[in-house]
Image (cartoon, rainbow, N blue to C red):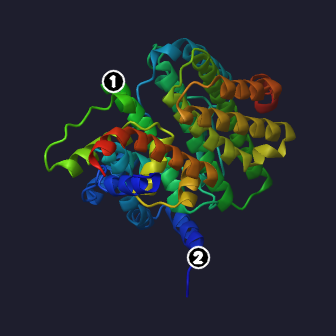
Amino acid sequence: MNDDEMDELLIQGARDYNEPGSVPRDAMWARIENERHGRATFSAAPRQSPRAWAIGVLAAAMVLGIGIVIGRRLERVSTPQGILVDAAPNRASVEVRPDSVVKAIRNETKNTDSSVRQLNQSRTASTRTDGSADSQNLAYRLVMLRHLAGSEAMITAFRSSARRGEVDAQIGDWSRELLGTTRMLEASPVTQDPTMKRLLEDLDLVLAQIAQYVTNGKHDPDDLDLIEQSIDKRGVITKLRTPLPARMLPAGT
Amino acid sequence: MIEDPRLADRQLVARCLGGDRLAERALYDAHVDRVYRLMFRMAGEPDLAADFTQETFIRGFERLSQYRGDSSLGTWLHTIAVSVALNGLRKVKRIRGRTSPIEDSPEIAVQPGGFTADLKARLHAAVDALSEKLRPVFVMHDVEGYTHEEIAGTLGIPVGTSKARLFDARAKLRLALAAFAGDHIA
């Protein structure tokens, strides 16, 4: 039997490989509706590996610290359309426990994503006045602040686990979520600041590389080296840290 | 009049983003069968297939504002689906601890008159044991009939890579079946 004949046999034999039955459309739709409209923000997320907890504690402290500083000056910023953006992260949800800290930080990054989406929708729908544009820009800057803090925490967690030869699927999910938020911010007024625009572009590249690395599902020193080069050459971590206080906070903070 | 599918996709997405629940259901109905079939082929269990399908649509709706129409909505959803399935199966494997390379697949005893069933069982075990890179391509192309262009768009790889992976997958499966087939297929 030659290869072509064997391939034909393979294809024939594979036709009933894991043959699906009928599609439970309505049952699945009911669960989707329930999840989308009823679930807590992070209740369905997979359990976070305890190995990242130490990094998580540091990152949580950073996010909390930034939030508290902002929170002293500005509890909430309201856009003209009435959409509220929490200036400070939800402190009640951040519990400093080994198995919950990274989960809490990822939760914050999900909240950031929702805030950006709401802002984009409100911006699209609004007729802007000078005052509304100012408050909207400030709202964008606040979510940008949270996004950068969350991105730094994720990149740090990734580097730590990758150096140990681990490929953590949860970090892959997290990086994809952050990548989505990054791309929404790239289409926002935040990019009127050239520094922020470049930072988001660099972040986009690094997050995409991390997402792809985790998707590949195995430790690959060469790919990891490329990611490290991107982070180092572009100074992503440094940029994530340094521009925050001076550029992003409201005057007088 | 022939409607541009991409335009229809964008219009449907716009309605969904505007909070139109009927549009959400229409989007779901348009794609759920194909997504579920692929998830079932990947997972092999109805509960897992349903879980993966649900998670695909939940994520899809969450990220709908990120859909830019560069690919069809179906391809975009399938990209999410394959990612969900691979991540989910990794977790299942970790929990069940059943990573089985092809070489370790159980030998199937040949029963008189049972050649087809045995060969299929051996083949299916060998497909199960393909790597994460090869199995989705084989399942999508040879089992579900996706084109290489669709596979490339879904997996984010060049068409040539899709073809190469299919070639590799078939070669591994041929190898896995060679001794079996050599003895029993003339």
Whether residue B67 is visible: yes
Q: Quadrant of residue A68?
A: top right
Residue at far front of view: B186
Please, is residue A58 above or below residue A24 in the view?
Answer: above
What residue do we see at 32% from left, 53% from top? A13
Mark 2 vs 1, N-terminal side: 2
**Label 1 environment density (alpha carbons within 10 Å; few <14, some 14–19, many ≥20):** few
Under mark 1, the amino acid is Gly
B80 or B161, which is in the foreground? B161
Residue A206 placed where, x, y %?
70, 33
Tell me the element at label 1. loop
Residue B103 placed where, x, y %?
37, 30
Quadrant in which the C terminus of chain A is drawn: top right
Under mark 2, the amino acid is Asp
Residue under circle 2?
B4
A11 or B153, which is in the foreground? A11
Residue at far bottom of view: B1
B14 or A234, which is in the foreground? A234
Tell me the element at label 2. loop
What residue do we see at 65% from left, 31% from top? A146
Residue under circle 1?
B97
Whether residue A86 is visible: no
